[in-house]
Amino acid sequence: MKAVRICLAMLGTLAMGYAVLGAVTDPDDRLAGHLSFLLAVQAAHDAVVLPVAIGVGLLLRRYVPAPARRVVQAALVVSVAVAVVAVPLALGYGRPADHPSALPLNYLRGLLTVLASVWLVAGVMLIGTRLRARRPG
């Protein structure tokens, strides 16, 4: 397992090196824009995302029983990942008024369907966990 981690770390480092080399050597690339975006994302992560994640973790620890905590945490992680990808589509960002087929689907309904499915699976897993805990022996 350690060898796999080392290989993955080396591949990630090579990929990042390739990306940085491409950004530095591309004459049409605006390096200052990339750096300012990177700093803004890092600041937003440290100022907003991290405190919210810590607060949600504390609330989970306080209000969710230990046997159910892993399932709820997993469902929350999947829900946030899906929402980050789907919310811009569900809100219609990028949909030009003169080109209705650019984003033709009801993405809000799709987002809600996926989130309902995630939490339905989590609920089934929680019921299974509770039933296993009550089983004697």
Image (spheres, grey):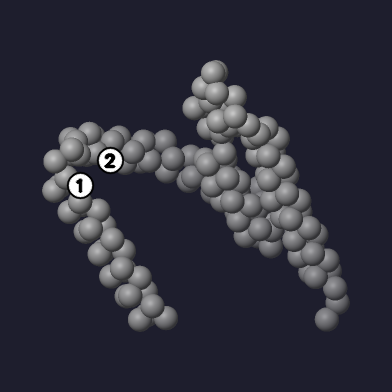
- Label 1 or label 2, whichever comes before in sequence order: 1
Label 1–label 2 contact, CB within 8 A = no
Relative to 2, residue 100 above or below: above
- In the rendered image, residue 68, in percent from the top left (x then y), is placed at 69, 58
Looking at the picture, which amino acid does disc 2 mark? Leu
Instruction: State the residue in front, 133 or 123.
Output: 123
The quadrant of the image that shows the C terminus is bottom right
Q: Nearer the viewer, mark 1 or mark 2?
A: 1
From this viewpoint, is residue 58 visible?
Answer: no
On the picture, is 17 further left or further right than 49?
left
Q: Which residue is mark 1?
A: 23
Q: Which residue is mark 2?
A: 38
The residue located at (32%, 75%) in the rendering is 6
From this viewpoint, is residue 6 visible?
Answer: yes
**Quick one: SS at disc 2?**
helix
- In the rendered image, residue 67, in percent from the top left (x then y), is placed at 69, 62
Other residues around mark 2 within 10 Å, as few (<14) / some (14–19) / many (≥20): few
Looking at the picture, which amino acid does disc 1 mark? Ala
On the picture, is 7 further left or further right than 93?
left
The residue located at (16%, 45%) in the rendering is 26
Q: Quadrant of residue 38?
A: top left
The quadrant of the image that shows the N terminus is bottom left
Relative to 106, residue 85 above or below: below
Q: Quadrant of residue 65?
A: bottom right
